[in-house]
Image (cartoon, rainbow, N blue to C red):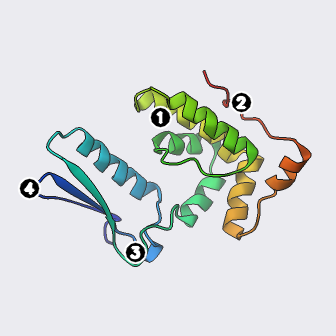
Amino acid sequence: MSSPFLATTDDRGVATLTLNRPDRHNAFDETLIAELTSALRRLGDDAGFRAVVLATTGRSFSAGADLDWMRRMATHSFNANLADAADAVLNAIPQGAAGARADAKHLVLLRDGRPVDAALAEETGRRIAPRRVSDEGREGITAFLDKRPPGCAKIERDGHVPQNPHSQPR
């Protein structure tokens, strides 16, 4: 099995980070996320690097999240999701159900002006994990995997939005 991630550097201070999962359309799973995050942190700590190029192998740049990884995480416990979410780097706020959107807004406020450090990662994980294991979160993942609209549309029409106990900014 080849490495899901390749890193090269040149004498100009340019690092090329290559996603190498062409059979999975370079979809992100826990291994690829961990390796990419580690490489970016190393580069961020090294003043000798001037630029980073993100490249891929295969015909697709990236399919996004690996569906098998998403399926596995949807069946894991709160603590397993907490550990996984604490290690994740938030790159974008996905559109989702009302509760998830509200939590995403609170995460943006939580990050504002704070350094990205272990404490922020842990707090982010504490806020993401309950949403992942909620009925709304599991329904959203299942609907996505089944390629159908999520049942949360009915929740939003009825005006009931499940609350995440960690959704209020501190």
Q: First in sequence: mark 3 or mark 2?
A: 3
Viewer-proximal residue, 159 or 85?
159
Quadrant position of residue 114: top left
Picture coordinates of residue 105, whole percent (x, y) = 62, 36
- Badge 1 amino acid: Ala
Q: Say left or right for 29 vs 7.
A: right
Quadrant in which the N terminus appears: bottom left
Give the numbered dot on residue 22. 3
Residue type at mark 4 is Asp
* In the foreground, 69 or 155: 155
Q: Is residue 57 left or right of residue 169?
A: left
Report helix, strand or loop for mark 1: helix
Q: Specify the quadrant of the image occupied by residue 68.
A: bottom right
The local crowd at label 3, few if under 14, some if 14 to 19, many if 20 or more residues have their Cα within 10 Å, is: some
**Which residue is under mark 4?**
11
Q: Residue 165 — which label?
A: 2
Report helix, strand or loop for mark 3.
helix
User: Which residue, given by chain and number where applicable, does mark 1 sit on?
Assistant: 121
Q: Measure the alpha-carbon separation of dots 4 and 1.
A: 33 Å
- Give the vertical position of 95 relative to 57 (above or below): above
Q: Residue at x 62, y 32 (%)?
A: 106
